[in-house]
């Protein structure tokens, strides 16, 4: 009898230590995410980015609600103990620290916030708070306009992408930079710029890097605009999207140095596999090939490693420089855009509103021989998500027009954005669900998230499309072992309606 009891005890111990117990998500179906909760924290500008703290079970959400009478600049704290009945329990005012808070990240009971200066061309700040009582732990000066912030996986570093946007007159253009804060070294900071790559400018531009502005010879370091950061599992390498520049930078966190810039090249829309809907005035949603290119220009980026290769997943939103002092965009139909008659023999037809005329294109590319004609047309973004080799920047996979096809089939495609950036993929997050690696791609203009199995990063497989709030900005995955309900959670925060939605797989 004693031996039998010991056998049962041993079996129970083995079962308790099995993957089933260690990974609560093992039986979840990543193709069946369902909304389980929603909370409205404001209107336009609220609910941009969120960060979850497993120590307290609280969700911290950026709230920059725009109001003429009472502008809001705070972080709302949401009790997530029951995701189906979320409630705001506190707020942390950002007014003492400067301008708007742009991004949040949490690690081991610490909340880090990226805050721009009231004068956006001046250096911004990172403020670190205790997630239990919200007390300030440290304030650190970083580069101009810190747009995204993240802790490294080991918590040793806080990294910010400092966009360094010019003023509206384009007379002041701060240096774009990346700040690396060493948490264990009393939050000491090193801010890196990209000036050392200036001698390589011509070679990099030949591969698709964009350096441009109101002058014919813009300063290289000031022209670079970092957007978003992801960090390797071993916390030794970071990759930063340079959105307007159409590139990704690689950073060594140990030596605190920029080691590479990977230009991303262009996407050919004159191929059947890349067919897009290019007009908002053709009274139809029809995917066709067109003699135009897309600049990848990724916003969000996330990484996972397989077989020794870091795979970088990007949401290829696209972005333009549009200021009083300099605007790069123009309609193809504009009289100022003259299409080369040899390359575009049907130019008059292409310039019609129902054809390619409504497409916004950049005037900084496409005129290859300095005459008045454009030999090629380049538009914003790639209307897709891509996978890149983080070692050399080579393209491993592009979703082509799959996001747009899925949104059209689901009836959520916004035809009014056809002439601009289509579904406008903006945020991307990766997670482990049901033993599979999953990518979540937020699409700002379709108000939806595409869910893909990316266990094989060279051949992602579509699983599901979920509807979310208006203009999803933040896409956050909470693994089951950190979740307040021990179930994987997807949290989507939307900036146009201030709504935070929570989904879980069945």
Image (cartoon, grey):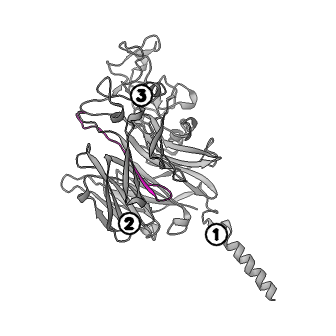
The picture places residue 266, in percent across and down from the top left corner, at 49, 29
Badge 1 crowding class, 10 Å Cα cut-off, few under 14, some 14 to 19, many 20 or more, is few
Residue at 80% from the left image edge and 84% from the top image edge: 4
Residue 201 position by quadrant: top left
Q: Which residues are magenta?
A: 151-170
In the picture, the disc for residue 499 is none
The reply to whether residue 82 is visible in this rendering is yes
Which circle, 3 or 1, is nearer the viewer?
Answer: 3
Q: Which residue is mark 2?
A: 78
Is the N terminus in the top left, top right, bottom left or bottom right quadrant? bottom right
The picture places residue 440, in percent across and down from the top left corner, at 52, 50
The picture places residue 495, in percent across and down from the top left corner, at 35, 51
Residue 399 position by quadrant: top right
Asked whether 167 falls inside the magenta stretch, the response is: yes
Q: Which residue is mark 1?
A: 21
| CA distance for labels 3 and 2 | 48 Å
- Say which of 276 and 180 sits in front: 180
Identify the main secondary structure in magenta.
loop
Classify mark 1: helix, strand or loop: helix
Badge 3 crowding class, 10 Å Cα cut-off, few under 14, some 14 to 19, many 20 or more, is few
């Amino acid at each position: 009898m004693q031996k039998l009891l010991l056998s049962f005890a041993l079996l129970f111990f083995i079962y308790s230590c099995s993957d089933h117990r260690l990974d609560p998500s093992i039986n979840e179906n990543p193709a069946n995410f369902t909304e389980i909760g929603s909370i409205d924290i404001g209107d336009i500008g609220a609910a941009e980015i969120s960060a979850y703290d497993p120590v307290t079970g609280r969700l911290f959400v950026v709230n920059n609600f725009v109001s003429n009478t009472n502008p809001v600049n705070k972080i709302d704290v949401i009790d997530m103990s029951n995701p189906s009945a979320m409630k705001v329990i506190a707020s942390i005012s950002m007014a003492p620290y400067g301008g708007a808070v742009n991004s949040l990240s949490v690690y081991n009971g610490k909340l880090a916030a990226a805050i721009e200066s009231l004068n956006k061309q001046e250096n911004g700040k990172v403020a670190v708070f205790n997630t239990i009582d919200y007390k300030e732990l440290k304030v650190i000066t970083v580069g101009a306009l810190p747009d995204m912030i993240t802790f490294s996986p080991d918590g040793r570093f806080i990294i910010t992408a400092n966009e360094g946007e010019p003023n509206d007159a384009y007379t002041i253009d701060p240096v774009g930079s990346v700040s690396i804060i060493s948490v264990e070294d009393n939050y000491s900071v090193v801010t890196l710029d990209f000036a050392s790559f200036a001698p390589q400018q011509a070679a990099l531009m030949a591969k698709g890097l964009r350096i441009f502005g109101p002058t014919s010879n813009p300063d290289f370091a000031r022209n670079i605009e970092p957007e978003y950061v992801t960090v390797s599992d071993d916390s030794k390498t970071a990759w930063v999207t340079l959105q307007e520049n159409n590139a990704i930078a690689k950073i060594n966190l140990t030596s605190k140095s920029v080691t590479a810039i990977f230009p991303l090249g262009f996407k050919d829309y004159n191929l059947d596999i890349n067919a897009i809907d290019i007009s908002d005035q053709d009274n139809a949603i029809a995917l066709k090939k067109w003699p135009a290119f897309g600049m990848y220009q990724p916003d969000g980026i996330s990484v996972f490693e397989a077989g020794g290769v870091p795979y970088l997943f990007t949401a290829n939103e696209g972005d333009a420089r549009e200021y009083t002092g300099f605007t790069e965009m123009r309609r193809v139909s504009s009289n100022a855009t003259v299409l080369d008659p040899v390359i575009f023999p049907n130019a008059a037809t292409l310039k019609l509103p129902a054809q390619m005329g409504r497409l916004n294109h950049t005037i900084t590319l496409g005129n290859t021989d300095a005459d008045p004609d454009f030999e090629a047309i380049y538009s914003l973004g790639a209307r897709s998500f891509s996978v890149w080799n983080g070692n050399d920047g080579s393209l491993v996979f592009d979703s082509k027009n799959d996001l747009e096809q899925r949104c059209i089939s689901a009836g959520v495609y916004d035809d009014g954005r056809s002439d601009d950036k289509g579904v406008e993929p903006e945020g991307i997050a990766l997670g482990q669900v049901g033993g599979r690696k999953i990518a979540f791609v937020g699409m700002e203009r379709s108000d939806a998230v595409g869910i893909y199995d990316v266990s094989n990063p060279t051949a992602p497989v579509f699983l599901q499309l979920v509807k979310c709030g208006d203009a999803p900005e933040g896409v956050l995955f909470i693994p089951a072992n950190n979740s307040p309900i021990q179930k994987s959670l997807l949290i989507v925060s939307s900036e146009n309606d201030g709504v935070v939605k929570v989904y879980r797989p069945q």
